Amino acid sequence: MAPSLSILCFGNSLTAGFHQYGLEYHPYAEKLEERLKEAFPSHTIHIDVDGVPGDLVITPPGRFLTRMQEKCSKHSYDWVIVLGATNDLGRGFPCSRIFPALKEAWKVALDSGAHILALTVPECAVVNKRLDSARDELNGLILNHCEERFHAFDLRKHIPYHSATENFRELIFDDGLHLTAEGYDLVGNLVADHLIPLLGSSDTGGNDLR
């Protein structure tokens, strides 16, 4: 039997691949799966996508933690890729509430034996000093978090909005918050570029897939 790799892409609308105002979905997991199959042709790659548009990390009122508990109790994942808190930030919740809620969700996956790849929260078209400051604070907490089997990737750095060219924004951003199909493919490629070296190294728990 071929060796396997099981991944959960978990989050909200950006994980679901929401675009065209919800008329179409194009999860970044599609491009990620394509890249992983190319990198590890001898492996059976299985990726689940659990993205709920509008969900909040803070539980309640959100269901982020509950959903993570349900997923990890039913399936055994090698890696869980988490992108959340866009909606919490937009609702004005402080980092002092968002980050502990994120850590609770991460803990569920870590306790199940999975590795975590946490993604930072991307920019959006809205110009708001409070929002920008809170996003920067949260992203800093994500990037500086240290825990066994925990890894972070600065997605926000690689898909800027305000400092990007007009051509980049038109290609990548659909409505100033969600991405186009090309944008989600870019996320899939960026995540793959970061994840593949981790999977190929036994030092980071990848079981040396190469």
Image: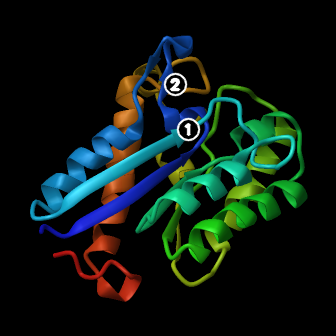
- Graded by Cα atoms within 10 Å as few (under 14), some (14 to 19) or many (20 or more), the crowding at tag 1 reads many
Which one is in front, 137 or 89? 89
- Residue at image point 14% right, 54% down: 38
Kind of element beneath mark 2? strand
Task: Say if residue 161 shows up in the picture.
Answer: no
Q: Nearer the viewer, mark 1 or mark 2?
A: 1
Question: Would you name the residue on which mark 2 appears?
Answer: 18
**What percent of the width, then of the height, locates residue 93?**
89, 44
Decide: few, some or many residues near mark 2? Use Cα within 10 Å; few <14, some 14-19, many ≥20.
many
Residue 157 seen: yes
Q: Amino acid at mark 2?
A: Phe
> In the rendered image, which residue does mark 1 sit on?
51
Q: Nearer the viewer, residue 110 or 158?
A: 110
Residue 105 has which mark? none
37 up-or-down from 170: above or below:
below
Disc 1 versus disc 2: distance between alpha carbons? 9 Å
* Contact? badges 1 and 2 (CB < 8 Å): yes
Q: Position of residue 177 (x, y in %)?
A: 61, 27
Quadrant of the image containing the C terminus? bottom left
Residue for point 35% across, 60% down: 6
List x then y, in percent, for residue 10. 54, 48
Residue 59: percent from left, percent from top: 82, 49
Amino acid marked by disc 1: Gly
Q: Nearer the viewer, residue 51 or 178?
A: 51
Q: Residue furthest bottom?
A: 203
Above-or-below relation of 194 to 12: below
The residue located at (45%, 54%) in the rendering is 8
